[in-house]
Amino acid sequence: MSGGNAQNHVSTEKRGWFTRFLDTVEWLGNLLPHPVTLFAIFCLLVIVASGLAGWLNVHVLDPRPATEGEVIAVNSLLSGDGLRWMVSNLVTNFTGFPPLGVVLVAILGVGIAERSGLLEALMRGMVMRASPRVVTVTIVFAGVVSNTASELGYVVLVPLAAMIFHSLGRHPLAGLAAAFAGVSAGYSANLLIGTVDPLLSGFTTSAAQLIDPDYVVGPEMNWYFMFVSTFLIAVLGWLVTEKIVEPKLGKYNPDDMDPNADIDTNVKMEHLSSQEKKGLAFAGLTFVGLIGLLALTVVPEWGVLRNPETGEIARSPFLNGIVVFIFITFAIPGFVYGFVTKVMRSDRDVIDAMAASMSSMGLYIVLVFFAAQFVAFFGWTNFGTILAVNGAALLQSINLTGPSVFVLFILMCAFVNLMLGSASAQWAVTAPIFVPMLMLIGYAPELVQAAYRIGDSVTNIITPMMSYFGLILAVAARYQKNLGIGTLIAIMLPYSMVFFVGWVALFYIFVFYLGLPVGPGAETYYTLPGAN
């Protein structure tokens, strides 16, 4: 499964064990159907299971102080009431699903910035202007930041990083690994609130409302922690690349390059043109101006977007409408850049960019339809609440209610991610169980979501189930002929291990030692309504 010089640095014994492990992961992953099919199956299973549980009168006693002692029984979807509910709510389950609208609105703005070339120019300028001494940390940092624009990092930065390392006389696979680690293993970290934030917060809101119907998790609720995480991932990625991965790869032998690889034609290696620099300058000024105007609405005590009842920023229209500002701060600078560089000259170009961004969301919309039904079925049947109550009781019985519970939770998320690589698909399945469960033992949904994002990120780079893994493998094989899955994952494994340990340590220091919130207005602990 592997070949070339990189292979020589992995012992035969270790490679044999590791290959068997990878074969098992790939086999298990291949057993899973497409995520859309998976959610359709889950819906059918919930329907059948609710009928059986209803017949068996499965129930628990409500532990919430406001309704303590009341019976929570399974509602059967195979009953007359269940059938009427499904028929009446199938459409609204989909159209009212929290992640759907916010993600589509955010992606409209990001699409303009991406189609105009603004995001690629920012990434290219950041990496190619870096001095050789800081190029590694800059590449990892750029990879993390690139997550704001979904697949841009995979398509542009990873091949570019390999070429930059090659041009500097360093091993191109080390550059590829550094970029891949930043883009994928650091997937949830970012300086800005991106499209993944409203996606995950929507699922978290739906899950939290199984316990507290009025609870809302905003897209900004993990921003503080993910902002700090960006710098941690950049530093850890730099250390792993230069202290572990590059020494292991050794000196690059140009003879190992695939003779059929036309390296120079796929990715721009040119420095930014004067027109692109001018476009970036105008886009930057526009961005600063927008931030200034936005600050006027929230910083002064009379700010119009503060909470009109309390005068505070918490639970204000500003935070509730954060997706609108994501749209504006990407769309307007994106158009300005496109106008200056003559990529966008009219409203037609902007409309085409927005339409192109929507066309790329077709699979996501189909996935959300079935995921929305699953989440709604799970909630209406009371399966989510019953599993959460029993799970919380189990954790309390074994005295596992302290902060250490998050280590096991993050480990579980990281393992599941090996076989179910989609962040939205995995969280749609696990959030309705674990968010209510951890709420019942006193932890806020925002905190649970932040912990999930660590586990969901760190193993992206070592699973063939990740959607862009094949693309990364193809780029790597251009520099190392006959390179296989085993070798690539062996290169990336140190990043997963170090990121897991470092990110979990940051989580505990940030939340439980320093007592900092994971986002604006986010709570660490949750108190059940009616509790003293």
Image: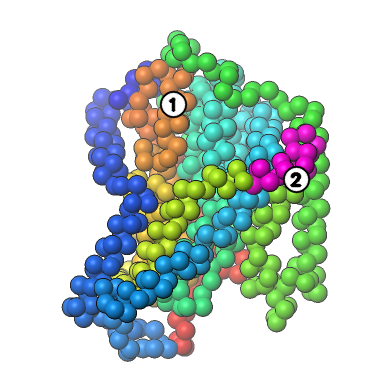
Majority secondary structure of magenta residues: helix
Point 47% across, 51% down: residue:
364
Q: Amino acid at mark 1?
A: Ala
Q: Is residue 270 left or right of residue 291?
A: left
Tell which of 258 and 467 is nearer to you. 467
On residue 347, the disc is 2
Which residue does the image show at 25% across and 40% down from the upper left? Answer: 27
Look at the image and say whether residue 30 sits in the magenta stretch.
no
Location of residue 259 with respect to 451 vertically, above or below: above
The magenta region covers 334-354
Which residue is farthest left? 56
What residue is at 24 percent from the left and 29 percent from the top?
A: 16
Image x and y of residue 351, in percent:
68, 46
- Spatial CA span between label 2 and label 1: 38 Å
Name the element at disc 2: helix
Q: Is residue 112 left or right of residue 199?
A: right
What mark, if any, has residue 474 been given in the picture? 1
Q: How many marks?
A: 2
Question: Which of these two is toward me, 41 or 141?
Answer: 41
